[in-house]
Image (cartoon, rainbow, N blue to C red):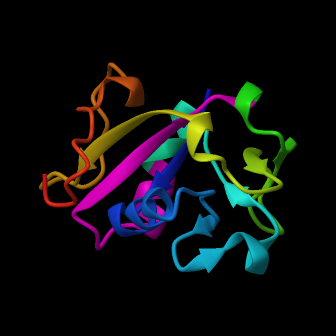
């Protein structure tokens, strides 16, 4: 499984239109970037801290790579960075998302429970829930 951090409004938009989801990263689309940024579980907190520090709520999309229909390539997120991240080189079908968890920023910032992203509360579909 790989993970994608999503703003609730972006996920709602994709599900209302019946997908696919085409947001690469915050404020950027698949067409603009060429892939959808994803993370392994140990990378999620760092990504949230770097790019979503001003947000209160994020969704954690758990993605089954077998359902994608597009290649996932392990590569650096930008030039000069050695760490590899999974990137989906195509749209994300809604049915490849096997779980949507809701994650709220604490007073200390973005910190996942030690149990991991798969144990975040299930998202109810209400962006304010």
Q: Residue at x 39, y 67 (%)?
A: 52
Classify residue 22 by image quadrant.
Answer: bottom right
Task: Please state if 33 lies on the left or on the right of 45 as rendered.
Answer: right
Number of marks in the rendered image: 0
x and y percent of residue 126 in the render?
Answer: 19, 54
Classify residue 116 by image quadrant.
Answer: top left
Instruction: Say whether residue 62 is magenta.
Output: yes
Task: Please state if 49 lies on the left or on the right of 129 as rendered.
Answer: right
Quadrant (top left, top right, bottom left, bottom right) of the N terminus:
top right
x and y percent of residue 29 in the render?
Answer: 66, 75
Q: Residue at x 67, y 50 (%)?
A: 92
Is residue 34 or residue 74 the one in the foreground? Answer: 34
Task: Please state if 86 lies on the left or on the right of 2 as rendered.
Answer: right
Q: Residue at x 84, y 45 (%)?
A: 70
Whether residue 83 is visible, yes or no, is no
Task: Please state if 10 lies on the left or on the right of 70 as rendered.
Answer: left
x and y percent of residue 96 in the render?
Answer: 62, 36
Is residue 66 or residue 41 the one in the foreground? Answer: 66
Does residue 13 lie above or below 81 as drawn?
Answer: below
x and y percent of residue 107 in the render?
Answer: 12, 55
Is residue 21 or residue 117 the one in the foreground? Answer: 21
Residue situated furthest top in the rendering:
115
Give the residues in magenta: 46-65
Whether residue 81 is visible, yes or no, is yes
Classify residue 99 by image quadrant.
Answer: top left
Instruction: Say whether residue 110 is magenta.
Output: no
């Amino acid at each position: 499984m790989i993970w994608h951090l999503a703003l609730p409004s972006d996920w709602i938009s994709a599900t209302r239109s019946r997908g696919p989801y085409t947001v690469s990263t915050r404020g950027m689309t698949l067409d603009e970037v060429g892939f959808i940024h994803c993370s392994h579980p140990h990378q999620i907190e760092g990504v949230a801290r770097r790019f979503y520090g001003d947000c209160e709520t994020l969704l954690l999309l758990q993605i089954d790579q077998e359902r994608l229909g597009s290649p996932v390539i392990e590569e650096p997120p930008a030039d000069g960075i050695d760490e590899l991240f999974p990137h989906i080189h195509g749209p994300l079908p809604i049915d490849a998302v096997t779980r949507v968890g809701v994650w709220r920023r604490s007073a200390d910032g973005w910190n996942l429970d030690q149990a991991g992203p798969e144990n975040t509360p299930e998202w109810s579909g209400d962006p304010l829930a």
